[in-house]
Image (cartoon, rainbow, N blue to C red):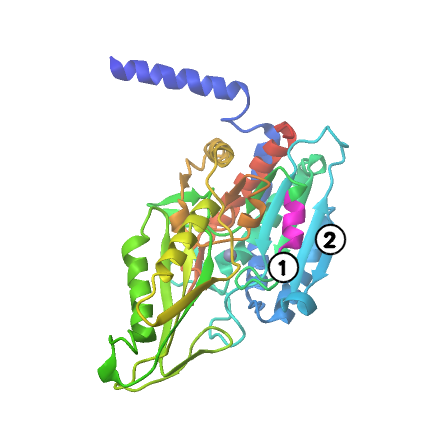
Amino acid sequence: MRRGIVVLMLAVTCAGVNAQGGASLTGTETEMARTIDAHVNSDLALLEKLVDINSGTMHPEGVVAVKDVLVPRFEALGFKVRWVPMEAETGRAGDLVAEHLCADGEGKCGKRLLLIGHMDTVFEPSSTFQKYAVVANTDGKIATGPGIADMKGGLVVMLAALEAMQESGVLKHCEIRVVLSGDEERVGAPIEVARRDLIGAAKASDVALEFEPSARLNGQDSVSIGRRSSTTWRIEASGVSGHSSQIFGERLGYGAIYELARILDGFREELPEDGLTYNVGLVLGGATAEVNEGNTGGSATGKANVVAPAAIASGDLRTLNDEQTARVEAKMRAIVARHLPKTDAKITFSEGYPAMARTEAGVKLMNEWNEVSVALGLGPVVEGGPMTRGAGDVAFAAPYVPGLVGVGMLGEGYHAEGETAYLDSLARQAKRDAVLMERLAEGGNRE
Ligand SMILES: [Zn+2]
């Protein structure tokens, strides 16, 4: 009896959604999905071509070569494309910016869309991982290659969705901005220059889609609406040096290494809270301690019988929102300031990636994505929480627009040799993107 009532209520709800065209596809939407299926082989060929171009962040010629493949494709879709070189300013290749204005004129168009991606990968020319290959014994379903999912696959998904929109006559009603950076994996400095195009486009948009990869969680496709921040910190501790027999005494105090150990243990004991992680990645200390230029190592000297006057540690900090960043940084400063006798220490924080907080507008967008997925017959999509991924470019847009993260290809093992992508996710994600963009652009009112 109870079960009967539940079924009845569900039927009423679905009918209600159907009446607005949300839970089923319109003729145009069905056509877009068919176009994507029909183009899948040429899209996979494009993916292979892009993956085989090495575009490590620190290899600007490769990033430019990827850009050169993409530019004519956006132009063919009617986008006005701009290449913004940045080598002189930030030491990175630059940004590809593409704009498509709505043919219906101001006021008649729906939500203005921002599509975010990056052309670089973590695999530099020195890596042994350079080429696309279909993985054996997967029935041709999984391929591997540098940046295949993160996120050359996302670039192809973006183009596949836009091409389907163009063929069905949807694109001309859309106002879309695309910003593809060349330095997402290792952002150039100063960050105001490196992310100027992205922030500018976000200010002129209503919704952002970030074509980063997603993972399957328990066999289901996932999408995210929050990303954690990522900043780095460094502690430099100092102390009085002298004969080890006098340590803890009035004249020498505790030395720099005990001071540093106290601080790190204070972090471990006092900082834990939900959504926060902080790693210590490098420690040096002794009579001398110096970090190298790339912050990837350094050198230290010291002797067992000498109290250490110098110690350095560096690490990262990841938070759910900027308020948490500020609070945790203040706690870290307070722990650092409680010096042991005859020691000193200071902590510095680098500029890094802000957090993209999970918001109600984001939840609404995720629900629309889910509705599109169900209408396409692709089943519901689960949320990948902010703890499931690292920081990303969408966070720079987040102060201005809600965003969906992970609308590119699905894969595994990003940033590691052997990274893979599920090839069938190319069409699945492109269909969801095309239908969502069409609904946002045609149905949505500007806010
Ligand atoms: Zn990425």
Looking at the picture, how far across and down is residue 294, in whole percent? Answer: 50, 74
Relative to residue 14, is residue 106 depicted above or below? Answer: below
Residue wearing tag 1: 194
Amino acid at circle 2:
Val
Looking at the picture, how far across and down is residue 416, in whole percent? Answer: 42, 65
Q: Is residue 37 visible?
A: no
Dot 1 alpha-carbon crowd within 10 angstroms: few under 14, some 14 to 19, many 20 or more? many
Relative to residue 292, is residue 5 depicted above or below? Answer: above
Q: Is residue 198 magenta?
A: yes
Q: Describe residue 152's horizontal placement relative to residue 239 as left or right.
A: right
Residue wearing tag 2: 81
Q: Is 157 or 288 nearer to us in this picture?
A: 288
Judge depth for marks 1 and 2 and give the one in front.
1
* Mark 1 and mark 2: Cα distance apart in space: 18 Å
Q: Describe residue 216's horizontal placement relative to residue 371 as left or right.
A: left
Q: Residue at x 32, y 69 (%)?
A: 259
Name the image quarter holding residue 347: bottom left
Ligand 1 has an atom within 8 Å of the beta carbon of the residue at disc 1: no
Q: Is residue 6 magenta?
A: no
Q: Is 372 or 59 nearer to us in this picture?
A: 59
Relative to residue 340, is residue 150 depicted above or below? Answer: above
Q: Main secondary structure of the magenta part?
A: helix
Count of numbered badges drawn on the protein = 2
Residue stretch rendered in magenta on the structure: 195-202
Q: Secondary structure at mark 2?
A: strand
Name the image quarter holding residue 447: top right
Dot 2 alpha-carbon crowd within 10 angstroms: few under 14, some 14 to 19, many 20 or more? many
Q: Is residue 230 visible?
A: yes
Looking at the picture, how far across and down is residue 71, in whole percent? Answer: 70, 57
Q: Is 240 or 430 nearer to us in this picture?
A: 240
Amino acid at circle 1:
Ala
